């Protein structure tokens, strides 16, 4: 089971922000003060606070005692010195939302973007999209382009984060094909990637028409995966808003909460 936490920054009160801040180590609190932008500072505090809050509940230690380690490729994870237990996580944020995926066994990657983010998207397509993706993008009506771009971008971000390779993999070598009804997608991979690279399952969630969240997990072949989505609520509490099941690659998940559009299944292929 992967737990996906979504914190709407627009609903954060000053008390909520203080509670997250108090969970940080002294070094993290000092780092937060270095941000000149209030929005970036808030995103950092909520992201680290959310990680320490949830990891401490899983590990049974105080939030400030959680220690972060990095893999050989630089991806952070939580491990307890007293045992072999580990928490594998990934965090992403944008000006409106902080999201975190966490579980005990599968490397995960998550990415969130605000669909209305003021970017010159047309200038970014050559950095993110393949030539065929760009052709399909420019065939869309203007009001559909932002959603298509951010769906593609966040999927590739989540996928490479789950693999632990980040931006070292050229996004122009990954190609997304969306189904006619946009309810499914295939990510075509370059043959230079290992067999392991095809063992990634992924989902997409849409919060109203404002944010898109892509989640990916590296899982054993034919393994069943499910995602439990939590809303971080005012008062420093969380509530489960949906449970999404994915039985193997390519099956369609279901979503139990009407506030979110049905998540989308994923299949990776060479």
Image: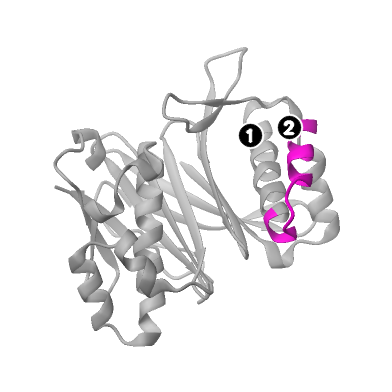
Q: Tell me what residue is drawn at x 67 percent, y 55 percent.
A: 40
Name the spot of residue 167 as percent of width and height, x first: 38, 45
Give, as a single range, the part of the protein colored magenta.
25-40
Pick whichever, 35 or 99, lies toward us.
35
In the picture, measured across the screen, residue 5 lies left or right of residue 200, that is right
Whether residue 250 is visible, yes or no, is no
Is 27 covered by the magenta stretch? yes
Pick whichever, 265 or 40, lies toward us.
40
In the picture, measured across the screen, residue 2 lies left or right of residue 196, that is right
Is 28 covered by the magenta stretch? yes
Tag of residue 63: 2
Q: Magenta-highlighted stretch: main secondary structure?
A: helix
Label 1 Cα crowd, 10 Å radius (few <14 / some 14-19 / many 20+): many
Question: Do callouts 2 and 1 mark residues in contact (Cβ within 8 Å)?
Answer: yes
Where residue 63 sits, quadrant-wise, is: top right
Whether residue 69 is visible, yes or no, is yes
Name the spot of residue 240 as percent of width and height, x first: 59, 55
Name the spot of residue 102 as percent of width and height, x first: 52, 40
Q: Tell me what residue is drawn at x 40 percent, y 51 percent.
A: 157
Residue on which the image places disc 1? 55
In the picture, measured across the screen, residue 98 lies left or right of residue 182, that is right
Name the spot of residue 142 as percent of width and height, x first: 36, 86
């Amino acid at each position: 089971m992967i737990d996906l936490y979504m914190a709407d920054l627009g609903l954060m009160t000053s008390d909520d922000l203080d509670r997250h801040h108090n969970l940080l180590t002294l070094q993290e609190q000092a780092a937060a003060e270095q941000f000149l932008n209030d929005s970036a500072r808030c995103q950092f505090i909520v992201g680290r606070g959310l990680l320490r809050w949830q990891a401490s509940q899983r590990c049974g230690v105080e939030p400030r005692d959680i220690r972060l380690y990095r893999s050989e490729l630089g991806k952070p994870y939580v491990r307890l010195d007293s045992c072999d237990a580990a928490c594998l996580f990934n965090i992403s944020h944008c000006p409106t939302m902080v999201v975190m995926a966490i579980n005990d066994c599968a490397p995960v990657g998550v990415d969130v973007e605000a669909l209305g983010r003021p970017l010159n998207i047309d200038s970014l397509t050559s950095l993110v999209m393949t030539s065929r993706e760009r052709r399909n993008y420019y065939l869309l009506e203007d009001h559909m382009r932002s959603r298509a771009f951010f769906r593609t971008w966040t999927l590739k971000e989540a996928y490479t984060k789950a693999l632990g390779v980040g931006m070292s993999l050229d996004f122009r070598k990954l190609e997304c094909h969306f189904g006619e009804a946009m309810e499914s997608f295939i990510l075509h991979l370059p043959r230079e990637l290992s067999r392991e690279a095809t063992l990634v399952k992924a989902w997409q969630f849409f919060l109203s028409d404002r944010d898109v969240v892509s989640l990916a997990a590296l899982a054993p072949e034919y393994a069943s995966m499910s995602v439990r989505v939590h809303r971080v609520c005012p008062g420093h509490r969380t509530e489960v808003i949906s449970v999404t099941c994915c039985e193997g690659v390519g099956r369609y998940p279901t979503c139990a909460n009407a506030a979110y559009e049905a998540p989308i299944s994923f299949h990776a292929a060479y």
